[in-house]
Amino acid sequence: MRENRAAFRFLSSVFDEESLREVVESARCELGGDPSVIFVQVSSDWLPRLPDAVEIIRVFGHARHVIGSTAEGFVGVGMDSERVSGCSLLFVRLPETRTEFLKVKADEVEHFGERGKRGEGVWLAFCNPYLAHGERWMQRWNRMVEHAPTYGGLASGMSGPEGTAVFLDDDWQQQAAVAVRFSGGVRVSGVISQGCRPIGLPYTVTGVRHNVVTSIGSRQAFKVLEEAFQDLNSTEKLAAPGNLFAGLALSEYREEFGRGDFLVRNILGADPEKGVALGAFPRSGQTLQFQVRDKETADADLRRLCQRVLRERGRPFAGMLFSCVGRGARMFGVPNHDARVIEETLGRIPMGGFLGNGEIGPVGSHNYLHGYTASAAFFYSS
């Protein structure tokens, strides 16, 4: 049997050898053959037993490689479980697909992009936010993979840096990032749901110093932000603190801009005299429109993107979801939101993933680090 297949299992418990062996054997039986890769997420309390867990998974799962991270919350089929002990496993069997695995240690982050170009295929990447240095890692990564689509997330852990790790097989000490590339035999398509809607009007950036926008449309940037805020109704204004962002247009060649046309970045600070500081480096001449995030917009955005994937690609046979820890019940007021939306639109597909400290995904032709975003990668047979 040469078809692509996947199987998902979730073990909600502290490390237990017998229970783990049972779920691994069950997943492999459902898969109907040996997996090409097993994606694994574990809670922080599993780290001291990670070598034992990986050995059980590889031996009884007949897996050449296990790749994954710690997680503060687990994603599964129609569910996400926050702040629980456990282990999730997504077995993926890709008989006709070439896979390449890559790991980057903390002391290699500054130079790993010099290893040579790896632009073919699609990547899934897991990063340790305490060792990978965020945007610097992303810049080097994009140069190395030549902007090949990359989906993934920044690991999370219930006990901070000491309980946060990424791993390839049982190697997790000082690993800044691990990744796997898929080429041939499978197509990977994804969605990046930033969950924001534009407010105010789009304007051209006319003044900028480093990451500080000083003027927009030849007016004080702070004034333009203030006007966008005043356009909100009274309820939206109360919810706005912490939920206002800047959207940088992906293309200037549009007559109208709407949701999904912007790369959403954090507003780090705003001052009437100095301007608006962003978590990005905008350029003069770029179109900017301020954005607001709320649960209704985030829900509608993810549903719209998943429905578009279904129309254009059909139903996938597997998926990985990387969702921000700031989403989940904290944003939506109910558990399981993002995973449930995917289940409702794409069906009950085997799906793994986790709630992390940041998300990785392409917007336009570049890969970016995101926040408060749902980044999902879906697997299709070629």
Image (cartoon, rainbow, N blue to C red):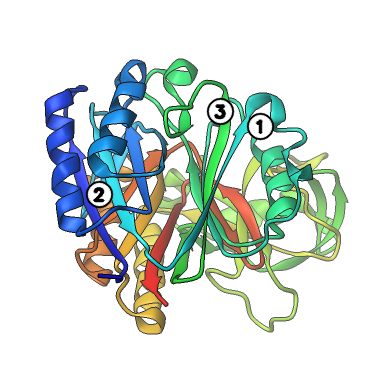
Name the residue beneath numbered marker 2.
76
Q: Position of residue 323 (x, y in %)?
A: 40, 47
Rounded to the nearest whole Å, what is the CA distance between mark 1 and mark 2? 28 Å
Can residue 158 be seen by looking at this rendering? yes
Task: Say what secondary structure mark 1 lies in.
Answer: loop
Name the residue beneath numbered marker 1.
133
Seen from the viewer's position, the closer of residues 226 and 277 is 277
Amino acid found under the numbered disc labelled 1: His
Q: Is residue 200 above or below residue 152?
A: below
Give me the residue at 26% from left, 40% from top: 88
Q: Quadrant of residue 160?
A: top left
Amino acid found under the numbered disc labelled 3: Gln
Work out which quarter of the rendered image holds the N terminus and state it: bottom left
Can residue 230 be seen by looking at this rendering? no
Seen from the viewer's position, the closer of residues 316 and 331 is 316
Give me the residue at 46% from left, 60% from top: 193
Of circles 3 and 1, which is in front? 3
Other residues around mark 3 within 10 Å, as few (<14) / some (14–19) / many (≥20): many
